[in-house]
Structure formats: C-alpha cells, structure tokens
Amino acid sequence: MCTDMAKKAKAKQAGPMKLFYIFYNQERWDNWIKTLEGADFEPAEGEEISEGEQMLFAFTEDITLSVLKIIRLYQNDRLTKEMATAKLNDVELIVMSGLPGGELEDIIGSIQLSLLVLFTACRKYLEGGFDTDIKTLVKKGRALGEEELEEALEIAADIGAAVIDGTACCAKYIKEDMDNPGLFDEWLIEIDTMSTAMKSLAKFDEVPGATS
C-alpha cells in the first residue's frame, strides 16, 4: 500500500503543474477603458505629455506584457504551442474586438492597429521560420507604400518574432523626428516596447495560485 502511494505521489510530482495565471480578461480591459474615459488628453500648462497619453502608454504596455507572458511560459516549457496559441487567441479576442464610443473610438482604434504586430509576431514566433535580418527587414518595410499594409505587417511581424527570439532591436531604427509616423513605424515602436517587455520578463515564471 505504501509502495502504491509512493508511486502515485511520484507520478503527481512528475506531471505538469496546473497553470492558474490569468493573462488578460474582459474585466481588465473594461476597467482600463473606464479609466481612459475619465482621462484628460490635453497637456497641463508646462507639460508636453497629457495624463491621458501617459495612461495610453501604460494601457498598451499592460497588454504587451500580458501577451508576452504567454510566450515566456511557452519558452519555459510550461505551455505547449497549442496552449500558447489558444491563450493568445483569447487575449486577442478581447483586445481587438469592438471599439468604445465617444472620443475614445479613434484613439483605441489606433492602439488596435499598432497591436496587430504584437499578435502577428507572437504567432510567427510560435510557428517558426521567420527572417531575423532586421536591418534588411526595416529597409524593405519602409520601402512599401501605405496601401501595402498586409505585406508591411508580415515584415514587421518577422522583426517582432526575431526580437522575441532574442535578437537585439529596435530603438535605433525608430526615427526621432517623426511628427506623423506611418503605420510601419508605429509597429516598430510597438516592437521596441516588446523588446523592453521581454527583458523585464527574463525571470518570469508562473507562481502557483497567481491570479493576475
């Protein structure tokens, strides 16, 4: 009997630990939207960046970190590719579905466009086979016209996947004098945020019982 119990205990320890981590949920999204609705997007006197703009950066960073935690757990062999893809799909459904009304509609729509590269790059990374020559990719992406968005997204997603994989990027490719950046440059800015997030998650792993 003791031998049977020991075998069961050993088998239990050898099995994968159940993940309790909630990566992102509808309530979290709704709370951010409610907070942003009350934010002031006009800079205060003497300030260059408004309260609302600061909140938008934190909002985008929160989504980026949540998504890349899924990828980090996949890298740590805590999630299979199928599990990581399913969790990625769950977060994407929340982030990319629908728009709030009022003044936030255009703002959140712009955020959704920039986050396209986050989800596309994560899928490319999970599937493998992406290009890692970032200098050439940036040159190709910038050479495309504004109407060639699908191709530009694929190129930007290769850059993002390479960054997730550990390739250094990509602040040096972001123009500092951009008053009205194109969508490809917006994607490079998001990829730079992804790069910073991946560094901050270097030691991240799911803690048993964690809920957020």
Image (cartoon, grey):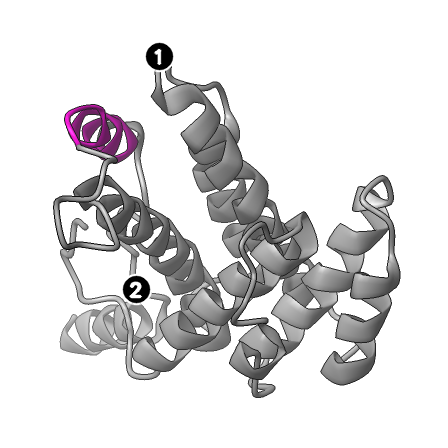
Amino acid type indicated by mark 1: Gly
Mark 1 neighbour density, 10 Å: few (under 14) some (14–19) many (20 or more):
few
The answer to whether any part of residue 189 appears in the image is yes
Q: Quadrant of residue 202?
A: bottom left
Q: In the image, is 145 to the left or to the right of 125?
A: right
Magenta: predominant secondary structure element? helix
Q: Position of residue 32 (x, y in %)?
A: 23, 34
Residue occupying the point 63% across, 59% down: 185
Mark 2 neighbour density, 10 Å: few (under 14) some (14–19) many (20 or more):
few
Residue occupying the point 15% across, 56% down: 210
| Quadrant of the snapshot with the N terminus | bottom left
Residue occupying the point 34% across, 75% down: 14
> Are circles 2 and 1 on residues that touch, CB within 8 Å?
no
Q: Is residue 33 above or below residue 118?
A: above
Q: Position of residue 151 (x, y in %)?
A: 85, 51
Q: Helix, strand or loop at disc 1?
A: loop
Q: In the image, is 19 to the left or to the right of 31?
A: right
The answer to whether any part of residue 133 appears in the image is no
Q: Which residue is mark 1?
A: 102
Which numbered mark, 2 or 1, is in the foreground of this view? Answer: 1
Q: Is residue 37 magenta?
A: yes
Q: CA distance from mark 2 to mark 1?
A: 44 Å
Q: Which label sits on residue 17?
A: 2
Q: Position of residue 95 (x, y in %)?
A: 44, 34
Q: Position of residue 33 (x, y in %)?
A: 26, 28
* Boundaries of the magenta span: 28-39
Q: Is residue 145 magenta?
A: no
Amino acid type indicated by mark 2: Met
